[in-house]
């Protein structure tokens, strides 16, 4: 049994300790906003926050998470920065298919919480682990800048 | 009768637990608004007003598609007494914005207030909704007018209801912004108050429908509306195929043959069945004959969660018979294609006399181009769920062709089509992959094997890359005879690539007319002697549609070659391209030996070289063509006509001393006729640029021993943010709503690859003829 703290709630999970957090979120708890994309921490679709740091749920076994605070896309709107990022995403029509965008928003939020005024290079560095096959990168960059309070960010 | 219906979210998430009913009391199923009720599966056989159905499909466009089109407001519109207008979207959303664009058309003609519009996703039911094949960049071009008529008819029914209540002539009332107003007195009723009476008004006959003057459009063409699904996407609530959850759901992962045509000889599931969470192991039988959209067969592990199923699959011991394609090797196959390209093939277009003109030409120039297989690699891998209850099967998933899933599941499970319901979720990317519904059939087969229990089948990324319906691989051989000024007077193009037809017809070896008609046969150039040949190629894997399909290799070869001819002539590439296109003129598909023309009428959709010239000139102007750039930087240009739209791209590259390339900017211009959602067009073109860059820079699926050599994104690299063009400027040629519309989702991709490689040539003098670029620029 592993006790997990997810979005402020406690869950007792009766699954093998090597089970990745991703499948606990998706299949056991029903938090399907965190997406499966690669299973090898290559695409970022499964990005969550673990004690405030972005982490890849697809390669993080639940055994590594006891006592740590996990936040998913479903709860990131409770955070002021997360809410601003979500609002910018909607305002600039960032998503196309939208499947990767939960992970993009989690990475972007983590970036802005640590670095409220990121440069383009900072954005590249923070977002390079998140693939968008639809190619929304220009709008993602613009939305991060808008959430950071820059005026006139256009996709 | 109280008639609840499900919102699209509820449908996607859990059909057993619909959200709060939105609709209406006292509406019989034959009355207005019944359309949405069918979404809950509550309405049985439904009669249509015959005059609103395409009874007798003519030949072209939407008329020629299976089940044609439907424009009845009874099918697409529901208005609740609370005034909420529900509009059905019958096409699948995969990022192209159709769930925003299509209902927007209806809402505009309906004079609905967008803030009170809800979008409801249709299940697979083409007899009811018309064609649902979400492909070919044709949703808007085929349904713009039917959806306008639908909205206008509903508006007129509301006006008729208000006029009847006031006992005034209908000409004295006007629908405006969710109300009907009696113009003389200013009296008004909201749509909700009129819904019930409107439902008993006759649907206007086609010749009585009054469409808006486009100058009065409130949403269409304004680009003001936000994407309807963005709030759910940004908060993690949006439901994709992989997100379906049903009570007591089981999870399946399948070991499929790694070689095309391979079969299971035997398997040992002992170890797999000992793992915690593994419930059962089931063999899926392959289907004899060409693959079509059928499952490949294999061994499925069914478990309590996806991870356990994945672990279980790893523990299977399977003996495979690899079959006839175990020798498929991409290196050897490239040589095979090159050999075929070196000899004459089936002549598919022959203008003038290429051989004589080439022999008499001042100079002959030859080049050959190679493009490898590509995988779609949608971020959501294929995934679907199914359950069977009391002989009725329900399937959930992201499908580009939901009716196709319905028909095939019914056939595979040997049940009537009416007993199969296909719920369409959002697609986490499609790009053509999800037109092929093998994964949906797998879910149904596995549910049946589990006595109808709900089963979700999930493809892992290596499944997706190993067992895709791949974009073809091709060698494009070009020869030109040029005159003293360097302009081509003779043009030979041999295009060699395994055909998508091989997925349907055993041993198909020639490109189909729908592949040739994608930019090889129908080059609209002012060249008197043109010969197009198609040597044979044998497929050794499943070939399928990939966003913009064979336009990719054809445009890459043609537009690279024109730039090579320009360089040989010492000419400016833009000026030379315009000269090769020739003066503005209208060319019929027949003149180009093109029998495809994207399924569109040759009269309504001829090739207009003036429009092609127009996008070249626009992209060049906006890009500042000819501006001075630092050493190592360059601009490249390319143009292509596809999906009855015209696109040109100018790409700027910067290549440093080590051969590292960046793309500071792309200017891309499209003439697709009038637009419904200009910001959506911009988004599609921006995405097309990134997908084109991705294919050019790193996209390659290769085979060895019949097996795909790429397992995941570390080996099949797709473009990430730092390598993507830093700035993509989209330029839309204004259109006329009275004229035929063109496609948008796909035509942006083809010109990007040659424009990029032409830019590399301008920057470095290096000509890329073999994709991907990979490390070819490294010094």
Image (cartoon, helix red, strand yellow):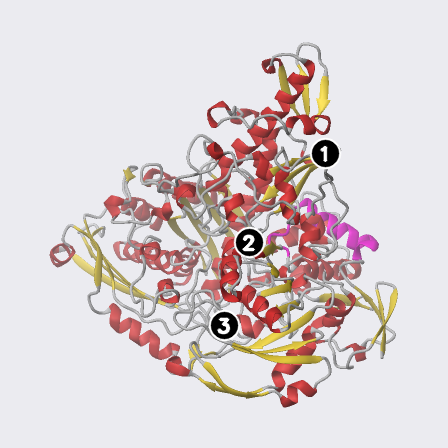
In the image, A134 versus B603, the foreground residue is: B603
Circle on res. B467: 3
Q: Secondary structure at mark 1?
A: loop
Q: Main SS type for the magenta part?
A: helix
Residue B725 visible in rendering: yes
Q: Chain of mark 2?
A: B
Looking at the image, residue B329 sits to the left or right of residue B567; the answer is right
The stretch drawn in magenta includes residue B6 = no
Residue placed under numbered mark 2 in the picture? B418
Image quarter of residue A126: bottom right
Tags 1 and 2 both on a single chain: yes
Q: Chain of mark 1?
A: B
Circle on res. B741: none
Q: Position of residue B538 (x, y in %)?
A: 32, 71
Measure how far apart labels 2 and 3 are at the Cα level. Answer: 30 Å
Chain-order first, disc 2 or disc 3? 2
**Picture quarter with the N terminus of chain A:** bottom right
Residue B36 position (above or below residue A33) = above
The stretch drawn in magenta includes residue A79 = yes
In the image, B506 versus B748, the foreground residue is: B506
Chain-order first, disc 1 or disc 2? 1
Residue B222 visible in rendering: no
Q: Nearer the viewer, mark 3 or mark 1?
A: 1
Residue placed under numbered mark 1 in the picture? B26
Q: Which residues are magenta?
A: A76-98
Q: Position of residue B582 (x, y in %)?
A: 27, 42
In the image, B557 versus B739, the foreground residue is: B739
Q: Chain of mark 3?
A: B
């Amino acid at each position: 049994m592993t006790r997990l703290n997810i979005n402020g709630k406690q869950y007792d999970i009766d699954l093998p300790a090597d089970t990745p957090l991703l499948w606990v979120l998706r299949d056991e708890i029903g938090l399907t906003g965190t997406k499966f994309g690669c299973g090898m921490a290559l695409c970022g679709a499964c990005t969550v926050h673990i004690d405030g740091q972005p982490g890849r749920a697809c390669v993080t076994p639940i055994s590594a998470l006891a006592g740590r605070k996990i936040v998913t896309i479903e709860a990131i709107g409770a955070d002021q920065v997360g809410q601003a990022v979500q609002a910018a995403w909607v305002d600039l029509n960032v998503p196309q298919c939208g499947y990767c965008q939960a992970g993009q928003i989690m990475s972007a939020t983590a970036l802005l919480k640590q670095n409220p005024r990121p440069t383009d290079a900072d954005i590249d560095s923070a977002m390079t682990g998140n693939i968008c096959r639809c190619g929304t990168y220009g709008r993602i960059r613009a939305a991060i800048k808008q959430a950071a309070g820059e005026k006139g960010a256009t996709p | 009768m109280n008639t609840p219906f499900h919102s699209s979210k509820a449908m996607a998430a859990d059909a057993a637990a619909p959200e709060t009913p939105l609709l209406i009391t006292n509406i019989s199923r034959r009355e207005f608004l019944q359309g949405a009720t069918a979404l809950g599966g509550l309405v049985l056989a439904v009669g249509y007003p015959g005059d609103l159905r395409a009874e007798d499909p003519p030949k072209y466009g939407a008329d020629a598609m299976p089940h044609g089109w439907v424009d009845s407001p009874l099918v697409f519109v529901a208005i609740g007494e609370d005034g909420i207008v529900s509009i059905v979207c019958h096409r699948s959303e995969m990022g192209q914005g159709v769930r925003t664009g299509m209902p927007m058309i209806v809402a505009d003609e309906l004079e609905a207030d967008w803030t009170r519009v809800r979008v409801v996703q249709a299940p697979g039911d083409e007899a009811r909704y018309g064609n649902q094949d979400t492909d070919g960049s044709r949703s808007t071009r085929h349904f713009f007018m039917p959806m306008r008529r639908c909205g206008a008819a509903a508006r007129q029914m509301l006006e008729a209801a208000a006029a009847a209540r006031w006992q005034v002539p209908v000409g004295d009332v006007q629908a405006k912004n969710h109300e009907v107003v009696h113009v003389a007195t200013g009296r008004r009723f909201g749509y909700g108050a009129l819904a019930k009476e409107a439902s008993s008004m006759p649907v206007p006959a086609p010749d009585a429908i009054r469409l808006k003057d486009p100058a009065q459009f409130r949403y269409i063409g304004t680009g003001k509306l936000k994407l309807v699904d963005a709030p759910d996407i940004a908060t993690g609530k949006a439901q994709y195929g992989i997100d379906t959850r049903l009570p007591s759901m089981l999870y399946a992962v399948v070991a499929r043959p790694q070689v095309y045509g391979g079969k299971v000889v035997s398997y040992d599931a002992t170890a797999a069945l000992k793992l915690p969470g593994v419930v059962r192991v089931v063999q899926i039988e392959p289907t004899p004959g060409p693959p079509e959209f059928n499952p490949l067969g294999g061994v499925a592990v069914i478990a309590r969660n996806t991870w356990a199923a994945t672990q279980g699959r790893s523990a299977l011991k399977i003996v495979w018979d690899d079959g006839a394609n175990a020798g498929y090797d991409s290196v050897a196959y490239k040589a095979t294609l090159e050999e075929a390209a070196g000899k004459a093939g089936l002549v598919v277009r022959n203008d003038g006399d290429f051989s004589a003109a080439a022999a008499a030409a001042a100079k002959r120039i030859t080049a050959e181009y190679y493009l490898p297989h590509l995988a779609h690699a949608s971020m959501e891998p294929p995934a679907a769920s199914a359950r069977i209850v009391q002989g009725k099967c329900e399937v959930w998933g992201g499908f580009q062709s939901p009716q196709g899933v319905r028909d095939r599941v019914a056939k595979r499970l040997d049940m009537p089509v009416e007993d199969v319901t296909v719920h369409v979720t959002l697609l986490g990317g499609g790009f053509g992959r999800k037109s092929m519904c093998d994964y949906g059939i797998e879910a149904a087969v596995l549910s049946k094997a589990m006595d109808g229990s709900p089963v979700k089948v999930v493809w892992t990324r290596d499944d997706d890359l190993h067992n895709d319906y791949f974009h073809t691989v091709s060698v494009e051989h070009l020869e030109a005879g040029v005159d003293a000024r360097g302009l081509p007077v003779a043009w030979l193009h041999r295009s060699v690539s395994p055909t998508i037809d091989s997925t349907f017809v055993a041993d198909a070896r020639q490109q189909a007319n729908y592949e040739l008609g994608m930019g090889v046969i129908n080059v609209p150039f002012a060249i008197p002697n043109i010969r197009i040949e198609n040597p044979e190629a044998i497929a050794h894997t499943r070939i399928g549609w990939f966003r913009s399909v064979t336009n990719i290799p054809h445009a890459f070869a043609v537009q690279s070659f024109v730039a090579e001819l320009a360089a040989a002539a010492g000419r400016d590439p833009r000026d030379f391209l315009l000269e090769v296109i020739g003066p503005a003129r209208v060319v019929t598909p027949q003149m180009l030996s093109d029998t495809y023309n994207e399924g569109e009428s040759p009269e309504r959709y001829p090739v207009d070289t003036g429009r092609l010239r127009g996008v070249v000139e626009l992209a060049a102007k906006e890009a500042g063509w000819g501006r001075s750039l630092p050493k190592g930087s360059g601009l490249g240009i390319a143009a292509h006509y596809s999906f009855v739209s015209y696109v040109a791209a100018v790409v700027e590259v910067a290549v440093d001393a080590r051969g590292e390339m960046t793309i500071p900017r792309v200017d891309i211009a499209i003439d697709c006729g009038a637009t419904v959602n200009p910001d959506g067009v911009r988004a599609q073109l921006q995405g097309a640029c990134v997908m084109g860059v991705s294919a050019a820079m790193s996209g390659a699926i290769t085979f060895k021993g019949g097996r795909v050599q790429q397992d995941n994104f570390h080996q099949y690299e797709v473009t990430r943010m730092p390598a993507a063009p830093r700035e993509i400027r989209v330029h839309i040629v204004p259109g006329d709503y009275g004229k035929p519309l063109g496609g948008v989702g796909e035509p942006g991709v083809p010109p990007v690859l040659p424009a990029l490689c032409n830019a590399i040539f301008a920057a470095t003098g290096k000509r890329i003829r073999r994709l991907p670029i990979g490390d070819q620029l490294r010094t």
